[in-house]
Amino acid sequence: MSETWLTVGSTQSAARVVLKNINVWRGVGVARFMFTFEINSKQQVVGGCPLWLGGRVEVLERHGRIRPYLATFQPQAQPVSLPQLGMDQTVQLTLTVSDRQLQLIEENRSAGGIQLDIYLSGYAIQDSQHVPVSESQISHQISQSDWISLLEQAGYHRVLLLELEAPDPQ
């Protein structure tokens, strides 16, 4: 499970964030990746606080040393209220990824899937004060079959290209 904990103002481990799923839609020269997160408040003091959440995504390259920036999240409907204890709140954030970026990911992808490093941050209003939501990271591994399925959702299809030697005209 891909999850992280948000620190809201001075409240450590205030909310747990779990990545539930990723969907993709095709655009003109781009694909929109929608990330659906589930948030659970773990500290009563943050329940009901308005939350503005954003962040960015980086892709782990084949050799595991470089995490190039992919895109910044574009929030859907915000703010959302941090849920009361025992309740869940769904938050959706989207990324717009160009066809060229997808091509570069594929060129640098190892034989398996890919790893996305998701960084979430933002701010909330707590006791009538704007307080920061410190940056938290989720490392999300996407298997090869799931990555191929996401690419198909983005409009890419498998092509099998066979090259045969031309027959000798003689």
Image (spheres, rainbow, N blue to C red):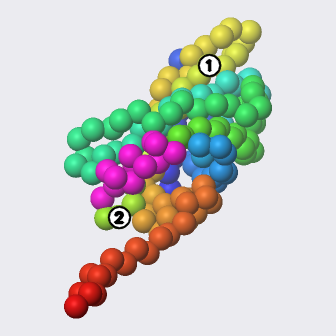
* Magenta segment boundaries in residue numbering: 99-110
Residue 148 in the image: x percent, y percent?
50, 64
Chain-order first, disc 2 or disc 1 = 2
Residue 106 painted magenta: yes
Residue 102 painted magenta: yes
Specify the amino acid type for callout 2. Answer: Gly
Q: CA distance from mark 2 to mark 1?
A: 36 Å
Q: Residues within 10 Å of mark 1 (few under 14, many from 20)?
A: some
Residue that appears at 65% across and 43% down = 28
Residue, disc 2: 112
- Please give left or right for residue 123 compared with residue 67 in the image: right
Please give the label number shown on residue 68: none
Residue that appears at 69% across and 25% down = 51
- Please give left or right for residue 121 compared with residue 32 in the image: left
Residue 83 in the image: x percent, y percent?
74, 36
Specify the amino acid type for callout 1. Answer: Tyr
* Residue 43 can be seen, yes or no: no
Q: Is residue 127 above or below residue 133?
A: above
Q: Quadrant of residue 39?
A: top right
* Residue 55 can be seen, yes or no: yes
Seen as rendered, the residue at the extreme bottom is: 170
Q: Nearer the viewer, residue 110 or 119?
A: 110
Q: Residues within 10 Å of mark 2 (few under 14, many from 20)?
A: few
- Please give left or right for residue 123 compared with residue 12 in the image: right
Q: How many marks?
A: 2
| Quarter containing the C terminus | bottom left
Secondary structure at badge 2 equals loop
Q: Nearer the viewer, residue 99 or 108?
A: 99
Residue, disc 1: 123
Seen as rendered, the residue at the extreme top is: 129
Residue that appears at 39% across and 54% down = 106
